[in-house]
Every structure is written in structure tokens, then in C-alpha cells.
Amino acid sequence: MSKRIELKSLDVYYKAFLAVEDVSMVIEPKAITAFIGPSGCGKSTLIRTLNRMHEVIPGARVEGQLLMDGEDVYGPDVDPVRVRRQVGMVFQRPNPFPTMSIKDNVLSGYKLNNSRMSKAEAEEITEKALVGANLWNEVKDRLEKPGSGLSGGQQQRLCIARAIAVEPDVILMDEPTSALDPISTAAIEDLAVELKEHFTVVIVTHNMQQASRISDMTAFFNIAGSGLPGKLIEYDKTEKVFSNPTEQQTEDYVSGRFG
Amino acid sequence: MTDTKPKVVRRLGDVVFANLAFFAGVSILATLATVAAFLFAQSVPAFTGPPIDAASEGFFSYVLPFVFGTVYASVIGLAIATPLAIGIALYISHFANRKFAQVLGYAVDLLAAIPSVVYGLWGILVLAPFLSPTFNWLNENLGWIPIFAGQVSATGRTMLTVGIVLAIMVLPIMAALIREIFLQTPRLHEEAALALGATRWEMIKMAVLPFGRPGIISAAMLGLGRALGETMAVAMVLSPAAVVSFAVLTSTNSNTIAANIALQFPEAGGNYTNLLIATGLVLFAITMVVNMIARWVISRRAEFSGAN
Ligand SMILES: Nc1ncnc2c1ncn2[C@@H]1O[C@H](COP(=O)(O)OP(=O)(O)O)[C@@H](O)[C@H]1O
Ligand SMILES: [Mg+2]
């Protein structure tokens, strides 16, 4: 399953500080949407509102509406835990659980929903997720070894395997390759393109080549100055944003004439 | 680039610090060696000298009940203290709001500063009478479990009371240590768990507890070390007998090594003193074995510790 996400005048706060102001956009299913923009403009903040991870920070809150296939994600009786089980997230720094084996890492999310699973079932899910994350061939002989023994790029793909093992509707990635070498980066990029066959993929990146290579839609965010809220400046097809943007700010940023 | 040999720069600060650290390390080892040598040397007369009345059946049958009492009381104490300490640490680090957590942390630290005589007195005067009815209830309802069987002590001054006093004594330091470990859980891993849709408790099971495991073991060993060596509280609460008994509610309880030394030392003369020192050596050995086991347990899972 892959869901359409609709943001309606979303304001995102840390206590009294308005970090992201008035974002409205529609994120299409089975596509990659890239968030780009200078550091501090609220890309991480915004992507974390999509799976309600924003609110785990004390004092953090959201105003406005966020719909997922028409359902209000911030509705009064929506359990954030349920939302997070449908929206997988991959972080900037690979974070497999260091105390778990590769296999247990892959199954960790799945086990939350299904405490009882047969050995065969566990093996099937592990293999499927690792194949999906293009990691199976590299780790199939060491599934019981700790995940922290893998290279950075492999760890990040393990985190992706962990996220897709629960078959979510949406995959969020916050600068998933910024801590990785070029070869690992290319592997993750290829993987992201494969993932959009099944999922809604949102990726934050500071790498504009990356955005233009893999994304279908691009959202450019900017801030007018420090202490001011980040805003969505332009949101369009990636081709359009990079070749013929409407806004001058976007043009300056994508052509590297920024700041 | 010109081809010069790299020059090793020796900064004064580095040299001083390296030497200080080296000296500190050596002095700990030297102290330990001195204590061990003293215990050894002073123990010898207990075996070579004339027989001692207190140990007419030989050293090992003399020391056995004390070894048992020491380990048993400490294990009971630790069995009670560890889950409580984990609970308190979790509450302070992950559940309480920040202000209240600070107050609570402060209260826990204060508990650690109370001298053990006070705990002993409190054990006799308050805890023992208070627990007495509970002991009767345990004996009546759960008496079929061997440890709760037997004739219940009328005074409440039993092995279980000692265990509870020891638990309360080691609780603060354990809770404080474990809290520090829990606070160090990488945010990265907590968020990984939450983002998978873990509830707070599931996050704690996935990220916090496994990460803190070596620390919990270390804290438990520190607590065990304190409990093993604790003299005053045990000496005051128990009226000892030379027995090996698992029953925790009766008035016949084996004493601990440390409490026995404290009780007997003032009246001991000649090689009776040496005998007591020999029991001290046994305590030393027990503590060392316990620590070695702890290290082994921690290292067995080092691969999964996240430290690599
Ligand atoms: N935990 C936080 N508490 C308070 N302010 C925060 C927090 N995290 C980020 N911010 C602020 O929110 C703004 C947006 O940050 P962020 O979303 O991290 O930007 P980006 O990911 O685009 O670099 C910045 O001004 C940043 O200082
Ligand atoms: Mg960011």
C-alpha cells in the first residue's frame, strides 16, 4: 500500500518557536518527493511531522491538518504509535540496534505487532526485507551477527530493511546518505527508486544532484533569516524545479548561487 | 613537501598527566597487593598454631556457615534491590518530569549518605517489628515454599529482614549508577524504536535496557560488593547461629563473614584473631570471584554492546 499525504497549512512549533510556517502540499503515492533547502530551514522538522515523531520532543507541537488518504493523522483519537507503524523512517545516521543481530534488527518492528511468529515466518520476512533493501546477498551468511559490525552503507540499508519489513505505506528518509561514501550512496539511491514501486517515499537531501537524479517531485524550503520560520517556497515536478523554477530564490539555490 | 622526519612533540601536560594516571593505577594495585599480603600473612597462624576452640572441627566447617550467610544475605539483598533500582532509574530517566526527577534523584543520593549503623538500628527498631506480621502471613500462606518454612521468628530479626536492610542500603548507589547509564542511551536508538511504532515501554525494552545491560550488571556487582562487606547492619539485626539454612523467616540464621569479624574481634585473642582474618581472606576471594564472573558476563556479549 502506498498513501497520498496532504498537508494543509501546517505550522510546526518547538515550544513557542515557530520552526516551519504554513506548509500546504500534496505528496503523491508511488513517487519520490524530495525536500531540499538550506540547513536550518525546517526540512527535518517537517518530515518528522509526517509520522508524528516531532512530538516526542518535549514542547513540540503541530497546528494545521495532515491527511493520509483523507484520514486526519493528528485527529483526536489517532494513536501516534499506530501512525508510526504505517510510516517508516530512516535517519541521517544509520541506527541499527547495536544489541541485536542483523536478523533481529530486521524483525524488530515486525515483532511489535506480531509477538508470535513461527521460525519459518521470521525467516521469510527477514529474507524479503533484506532482498528489498538490496542487502540480502551481503549478509545472508551472517544473520546472527550484530548489525553494528556492518559498514555504514550496509547499516543504512539494514535500517531500510527494518523499516520495510513491516510493510508500511510511507517511507521517510532524512538525509539518508549524508554520512555515507559515494558507492553506498549510489546503492541507497537505486534502492529508493525501487522502493517507490510500493511506497510513498519522502527524502530530505542537501544534495541537489541526488534530488534531481531520483525524485519525481521536489519541494524547496527556505528561511528569511535565523529565528524566522522556514517556508515552502516552491513545489513542483523535479524537472521543472531544476530547469525552470518559478521563484527567483529557487533558481538561486538550485544553480548554486545561494547566500 | 620536503622530506623531514616527523618529530615527536612531547608536551609537558601530556607527560605529567600520563605519569599521574600511571601512578594512580599502580597505587591501586599496590594497595590491593598489600592488603592481600597482609591477609595471607596473618591467616597462616590460624592453620599452623594450636587448635582454636571456636573452630574445633577445622577451618572449613567453621567458615562455611559464614560464607553461606554472606552470600545468601547479599543475594537476597541484590534480588530485591536490582529490580527496584532499575525501576527507580527508569522512572527518573524516562518517565518523571524533569523537576520531580531532580528532587527524586536528590533524595536517592541522600539515602546513600546514611551510615550503616543507622540502617542497622532502623532494621531492629522499625523494620523488624513492622515486617513481623508479614512474615507470619508469608509463613502461613506460602510456607510450602522451603524458604518460607519453619518456625517464624517472634522478633522479625531474620535473614529476610537483613536482606531487605541490605537492599535498601545498596539501592541508592545502584539506582544512581543505573540512572546515569539509562540517561546515556543514544537518542538515535530511542528514536529508531519510536519510529518503528514502539510504545514508550517497548522503546525501553528495545533500546534502553539492552544498552544499559552491562551498566546494570556493573551496578549490581558494586551493590553486591557493598552488601558482601556490610558489617554493622547485619551484625545488629541478626542473632547468629552456626548453621546453613535457606529458611528466611526463622530466628536461626547463619551470620555473615563481615558481621562475624565485627562481633568477635573485640574478644578475640591469640590465633583466634588469625582465624578471623582468614575468614576475611575468604571474603576477599568471594568478592574477587564475583567480580570476575561479572566481567565474564559482560564480555561474553561485548560484540553486541554497540561499543564497536
Ligand atoms: N529539538 C529542537 N528544539 C528546538 N528547536 C529546534 C529543534 N530541532 C530543530 N530546531 C530548530 O528548528 C529549525 C529547523 O531545524 P531543522 O528542521 O533541523 O532544519 P533542517 O533539517 O532543514 O536543517 C532550526 O532553527 C532549528 O534550530
Ligand atoms: Mg536536517
Image (spheres, helix red, strand yellow):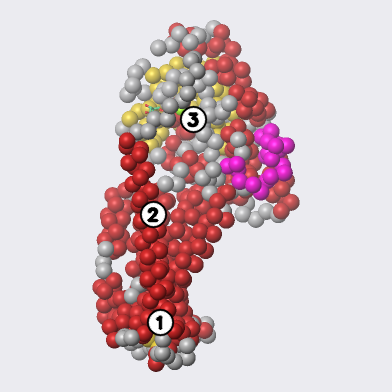
Residue at 35% across, 79% down? B261
Quarter of the picture containing the N terminus of chain A is top right
Q: Quadrant of residue B78?
A: bottom left
Residue A217 position in % (x across, y down): 57, 19
Residue at 58% across, 19% down? A210
Image mark 3: chain: A
As for residue B208 lying within the magenta part, the answer is: no
Q: Amino acid at mark 3?
A: Ile
Q: Which residues are magenta?
A: A129-149
**If the picture is divided into quarters, which one holds ligand 1?**
top left
Image mark 1: chain: B
Check contact, mark 3 vs mark 1: CB within 8 A: no
The residue at which mark 1 appears reads as B45
Task: Establish if A258 lies above or below B180.
Answer: above
Q: Is mark 2 within 8 Å of ligand 1?
A: no
The residue at which mark 3 appears reads as A47
Is residue A17 among what the camera can see? Answer: yes
Residue B241 position in % (x across, y down): 40, 88
Q: How many residues crowd mark 3 within 10 Å: few (<14), some (14–19), many (20+)?
A: many
Report the Cα–Cα distance between label 3 and label 1: 75 Å
As for residue A135 lying within the magenta part, the answer is: yes
Q: Amino acid at mark 1?
A: Pro
The residue at which mark 2 appears reads as B26
Is residue B250 among what the camera can see? Answer: no
